[in-house]
Image: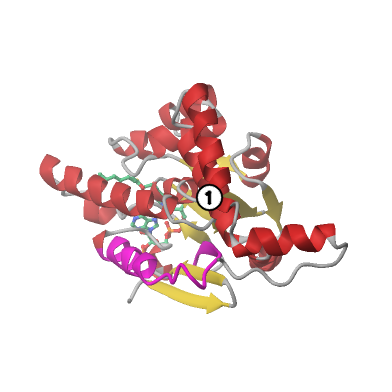
């Protein structure tokens, strides 16, 4: 992979978009590398994934404007479909994904962060959907996930008026969970990832499914889904281990993802 690096640190996989000279802008080659990185994640030994951008300045400054500048409608449709498919795969990874947003997260960068479960930002992070000012719509899920994350009114303001927001406002509107000095961002993302990785993996994955699938359902269907996902945890080795340890007033053994 030329544009994406993957490192495994214990149970945490770290994906770095690495096209720093173009502020990690996404073209088909970067998207293909991102897909290869996702394909390579070993679900048995990876309990949380962090996605970040190379360098100090940008998470991802958007889809590649040069590449899009000459696109025909058919090429635009294919590019949008490619990005949407890759981002949907990230969203559907079984384990939680944290976006460590280390600078500009514009257009496709904001959309990439929205396909992750949790966003943590550096103090210099800037979020926005500048597409309407470039004569296009957001095309990698931004019209859908931004509205679902920050609410319809705020998403419409950001998208229609191409109003970028800084980290502090992103925190206030619930786009990010926390903001850290740039030099502490990865350490904090890793701490959160390791905390998640310390919990029972099957339970965490069922929680992710329950929240993500349930949010797309009416409340009756969603509350009918929950017992099924709960049931799938009962009888697992990790559940027996944790609950027996609680009852015996001792620390449980490390979880084994079984
Ligand atoms: N695409 C291509 N190249 C980029 C991009 C981008 N999105 N962003 C930055 N770069 C390049 C610059 O061209 C420059 O390259 P070079 O050194 O060769 O001139 C290099 O990165 C550094 O950028 P700047 O010199 O501009 O750095 P500044 O610090 O002055 O500015 C900004 C940083 C403010 C981030 C500025 O680069 C900028 O405004 N970038 C564009 C941001 C943007 O509009 N992003 C949204 C793009 S649209 C989009 O993402 C649509 C997604 C859905 C697509 C659906 C397809 C159908």
Question: Observer-nearest residue: 1 or 212?
Answer: 212
Q: Residue at 71% of width from left, 57% of height from top?
A: 180
Residue 124 at least partly seen: no
Where is residue 25, by image quadrant? bottom left
Residue 50 part of the magenta segment: yes
Q: Which residues are magenta?
A: 29-54
Tell me the quarter of the image containing the N terminus: bottom left
User: Which quadrant, please, contains the C terminus?
Assistant: bottom right
Taking the image in four quarters, ligand 1 sits in the one at bottom left
Residue, far right: 249
Nearer to me, 122 or 222: 222
- Circle 1 packing at 10 Å, graded few (<14), some (14-19), many (20+), is few
Residue at 54% x, 55% y: name it.
Answer: 96
Per the image, is 240 magenta? no
- Drawn side of residue 210 relative to residue 137, left or right: right
Which one is nearer the viewer's eye here, 129 or 2?
Answer: 2
Q: Position of residue 177 (x, y in %)?
A: 66, 46
The residue singled out by tag 1 in the image is 232
Whether residue 226 is situated above or below residue 119 in the rendered picture:
above
Q: Residue at x 85, y 66 (%)?
A: 250
Please tell me which residue lies in front, 223 or 56: 223
Q: Residue at coordinates 25% horizontally, 55% vertically from top-left? A: 66
- Name the side, left or right, on which 52 lies relative to 41: right
Question: How is the rendered protein coloured?
Answer: secondary structure
**Res. 256 in view:** yes
Residue 60 drawn at (x, y percent): 44, 57
The image shows a total of numbered marks equal to: 1
């Amino acid at each position: 992979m030329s544009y994406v690096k993957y490192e495994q640190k214990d149970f945490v996989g770290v994906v770095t978009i690495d096209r720093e000279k173009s502020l990690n802008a996404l073209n088909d080659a970067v998207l293909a590398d991102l897909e290869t990185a996702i394909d390579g994640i070993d679900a048995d030994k990876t309990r949380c994934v962090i996605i970040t951008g190379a360098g100090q300045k940008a998470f991802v400054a958007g889809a590649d404007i040069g590449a899009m500048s000459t696109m025909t409608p058919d090429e635009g449709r294919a590019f949008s479909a490619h990005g949407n498919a890759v981002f949907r795969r990230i969203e559907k990874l079984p384990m939680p994904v944290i976006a460590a947003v280390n600078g500009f997260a514009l257009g496709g960068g904001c959309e990439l962060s929205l396909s992750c479960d949790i966003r943590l930002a550096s103090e210099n992070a800037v979020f926005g959907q500048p597409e309407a000012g470039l004569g296009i719509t957001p095309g990698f899920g931004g019209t859908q996930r931004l509205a679902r994350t920050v609410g319809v009114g705020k998403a419409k303001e950001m998208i229609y008026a191409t109003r970028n927001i800084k980290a502090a406002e992103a925190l206030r509107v619930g786009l990010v969970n926390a903001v850290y000095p740039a030099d502490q961002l990865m350490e904090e993302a890793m701490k959160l990832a390791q905390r998640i990785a310390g919990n029972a993996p099957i339970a965490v994955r069922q929680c992710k499914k329950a929240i993500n699938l349930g949010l797309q359902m009416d409340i009756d269907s969603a509350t009918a889904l929950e017992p099924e996902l709960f049931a799938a945890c009962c009888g697992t080795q990790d559940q027996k281990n944790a609950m027996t340890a609680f009852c015996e007033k001792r620390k449980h053994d490390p979880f084994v993802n079984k």
